[in-house]
Image (spheres, grey):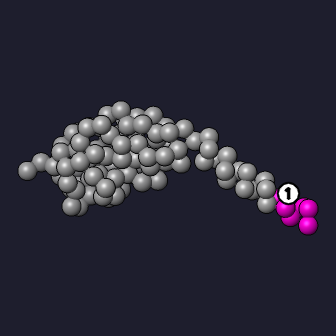
Amino acid sequence: MHRVFSRLFVVLGLLVSTNLFAAAPTITSFTPTSGGAGTSVAISGTNLTGATVVKFNGVAAASFTGSTTITALAPAGVTTGKISVTTAGGTATSSASFTVAA
């Protein structure tokens, strides 16, 4: 019984420590600052490695790749608003808005 509990605590400890020690991401800039659906946007910042979600004004990117710089495709139905990136360390939100071109 003791062996089962010790293994359980080790697994739980690893899960908790992974989330507790992940550095918070930041978005420092993105380019271009405007476009429409399908626009490829380069997002720069810190601690972006392992991103799980990229959103444009709350709408998930059509796709994204990268770690230190993320390249994301603006989704269909994109509207003007902030860009966010979620990692194990939390969610970073841009200070500037991505503007949808008329």
Residue 3 lies, in percent from the top left, at: 90, 61
Query: What residue is drawn where x is 46% and y is 39%?
Result: 25
User: Callout 1: few (<14), some (14-19), or many (20+) C-alpha neighbours within 10 Å?
Assistant: few
Comparing 85 with 63, the one in front is 85
Is residue 66 at all visible to an observer of this figure? no
Q: Does the magenta stretch include residue 3?
A: yes
Residue 2 vertical placement versus 40 (above, below): below
Q: What element carries label 1?
A: helix
Comparing 19 with 63, the one in front is 19
Query: What residue is drawn where x is 67% and y is 46%?
Result: 17
Outermost residue on the left side: it is 102
Q: Given the image, on which type of amino acid does mark 1 rest? A: Ser
Residue 31 vertical placement versus 74 (above, below): above
Residue 3 vertical placement versus 98 (above, below): below
Residue 30 lies, in percent from the top left, at: 29, 37
Residue 37 lies, in percent from the top left, at: 21, 56
State the quadrant of the N terminus. bottom right
Please, what is the dominant secondary structure of the magenta stretch?
A: helix
Comparing 30 with 39, the one in front is 30
Comparing 1 with 39, the one in front is 1
Query: What residue is drawn where x is 82% and y is 59%?
Result: 7
Return the residue at label 1. 6
Q: Is residue 55 left or right of residue 77?
A: right
Outermost residue on the bottom side: it is 1
Q: Does the magenta stretch include residue 94?
A: no
Query: What residue is drawn where x is 28% and y is 45%?
Result: 82
Is residue 81 at all visible to an observer of this figure? yes
Q: Is residue 63 left or right of residue 11?
A: left
Residue 85 lies, in percent from the top left, at: 40, 47
Per the rendered image, the range of residues in magenta is 1-7
Q: Is residue 12 left or right of residue 20?
A: right
